Amino acid sequence: MGNAMQEAFALNSLRASYGCVDWFPYDRYVPATSPGAAVTPDTPALTGESGGDIAAKRGVAVKNAAHLWALVLAAGDGSRLRDLTIRADGGPVPKQYCSLRGGPSLLEETLRRAASVALPVHISLIVAAQHRRWWSPTQLSLPASRVVVQPRNRGTANGILLQMLHVMRVDPDAQLVILPSDHFVADERILAQAIRSAQSNLLTTPDQIILLGMQPSFPDADLGYICPGARDGRGTFAIAGFVEKPCAERALQLIERGALWSAFIIAARCSTLLGLYERRFPQIVRAMCQALGDKTNPTARVAELYEKLPTLDFSRDVLELADLRQLRVLAVRGCGWSDLGTPERVGQTLARFSRSGGQTLRSASAAAPPNLAHLYRLPPAASASVTRSWHSH
């Protein structure tokens, strides 16, 4: 079968499996060893079960701990939750500095998540200069050298690049897991096991980029979906395509065909991700390296550079450049994951606690993080009925 025929076959198979795949690099060759082999999705085996395989992989990950790093992303403005995260004096608090139900903030919870998979000295946190009133290295129990301050928000792509370059100056062989700080996870143990599994896979396939895909609990129309392709024999799957924010009906169809929620939790070698940047934005990489290497005032040089940088999104502007053969998805079994990106998803998460009998914690003092459970009105019955209809499906 020639390349042109293979490509046509692969695309037709994807459309048959998932409908129209919204993002797919149609100009690239998709290898197919036999009819349907590279594009017909297997049912993803969900990672996170306790057992010998996970225990073995965890042992491998621990042995390689010298180069494992967790990058915690906390420089976003949380604009979609701004109306919800209002202090008593009328000022908004970035959502990562709020708690879901009282107790630790979402950022503190994410730092604990990072510590479950990486050594404390290998946790790197990126924060925003304009949020300084809500963070300090002392408050977060991190060395100042592990806190990267972004002068202004220029999108996730520039923030991750800045953070990676800081890490590579310390450890050129760094292997990363990227952790956004606006997630809630009911069972952290399951997620930690999945992250360790992804990290140990990179020991044998160092040039791959592994995305964690979450088992959907209902057809959420405001999330991105990953369409798994062929099983690769290492516990991960090729990626057939991505669908961004489908309607609820389409989301249900995707789930029935094995699609997973995209969580933006990514495992990869630093050098692999840097290679993507260098192919797409060599001038930015060069300018940022020069700014960080300034012998007199690197902070001022980075701030000057940020005034000129375009706003870039990591998924859209960097990850889509990757060769499909580099991308893999690891399916995570239900761990109660939620992206708290919108008021609706905050409500859905809080409603789960209400139905399960979970109690909302009380903030201990006025200085405690704003409690989203106190600020949010539970979603209307119509929203709850969508969830019920999915569970009864």
Image: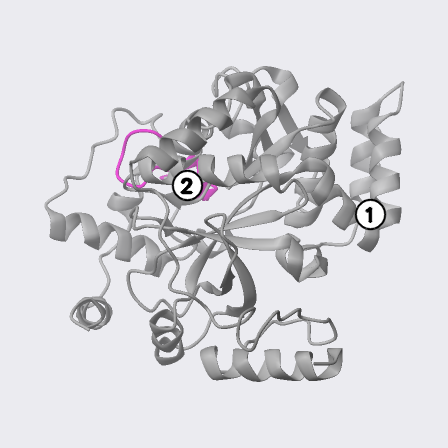
What x and y, as percent, mark residue 194?
41, 41
User: Where residue 314 is drawn, which disc sits there?
Assistant: none
Q: Nearer the viewer, residue 84 or 294?
A: 294
* Residue assigned mark 1: 278
Name the residue at 78% across, 26% down: 299
* Residue assigned mark 2: 194
Residue 183: name its quadrant. Answer: top left
Residue 250: name its quadrant. Answer: bottom left
Q: Nearer the viewer, residue 3 or 191?
A: 3
Q: Nearer the viewer, residue 266 or 51?
A: 51
What is the magenta segment's predominant secondary structure? loop
What x and y, as percent, mark residue 323?
70, 59
Which element is circle 2 on? helix
The answer to whether residue 113 is seen in the rendering is no
Which element is circle 1 on? helix
Position of 128 with respect to 112 (left or right) is right
Name the residue at 66% across, 45% down: 153
The answer to if 87 sits in the magenta stretch is: no
Q: Is residue 333 above or below residue 56?
A: below
Q: Quadrant of the C terminus?
A: bottom left
Range drawn in magenta: 88-104
Name the residue at 38% across, 32% down: 109
Q: Quadrant of the N terminus?
A: bottom right
Earlier sequence position, callout 2 versus callout 1: 2
Q: At label 1, which amino acid type do we have?
A: Glu
Mark 2 to mark 1: distance in Å? 29 Å
What x and y, as percent, mark residue 189?
32, 34
The answer to whether residue 380 is seen in the rendering is yes
Position of 375 with respect to 42 (left or right) is left
Q: At label 2, which amino acid type do we have?
A: Ala
The answer to if 95 sits in the magenta stretch is: yes
Mark 2, other Cα within 10 Å: few <14 / some 14–19 / many ≥20: many
